[in-house]
Image (cartoon, rainbow, N blue to C red):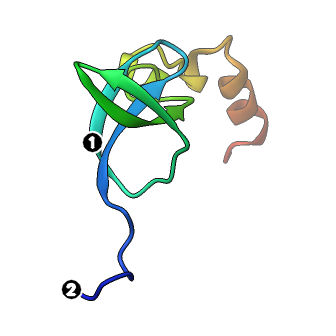
Amino acid sequence: MKEGIHPNYREVLFVDMSNGFKFVTRSCVSTKETENFEGKEYPLFKLDTTSESHPFYTGTQKSVDNMGGRVEKFRNRFGKK
């Protein structure tokens, strides 16, 4: 490998800010903060949403089809006849 052309690929701690879920994975993301996790210090990257808090993965996502019949009204008015 050539020297000086590759990004800094290392273990990084990702934290979901909505629920505090933390996980470590390897990444090239640049960070300025660090945090201790399970006895080791990692670069810290804060996330808004992860699979632990996203409605699709947690099963709390609402379907548009059953929200007060609005979709059905639209289909009745503008659907094929």
- The answer to which of marks 1 and 2 sits earlier in the sequence is 2
Element under label 1? strand
Horizontal side of 75 relative to 27 (left or right) equals right
Residue depth check, mark 1 versus mark 2: number of the one nearer the observer? 2
* Image quadrant in which you'd find residue 18: top right
User: Of 64 and 21, which appears nearest the observer?
Assistant: 21
| Image disc number at residue 81 | none
The amino acid marked with disc number 2 is: Met
Q: Residue at x 54, y 20 (%)?
A: 17
User: Of 6 and 51, which appears nearest the observer?
Assistant: 6
Q: Residue at x 67, y 47 (%)?
A: 80
Q: In what quadrant of the picture does the N terminus appear?
A: bottom left
Q: Residue at x 67, y 27 (%)?
A: 71
Q: Farthest residue toward the bottom?
A: 2
Which residue in the protein does label 2 denote?
1
Query: Where residue 31 sits in the image (x, y, percent)?
Result: 52, 46
Horizontal side of 80 relative to 18 (left or right) equals right
Which residue in the protein does label 1 denote?
25
Horizontal side of 25 relative to 49 (left or right) equals left
18 shown above or below 40: above
Cα distance in 3D space between marks 1 and 2? 23 Å
The amino acid marked with disc number 1 is: Thr
78 shown above or below 20: below
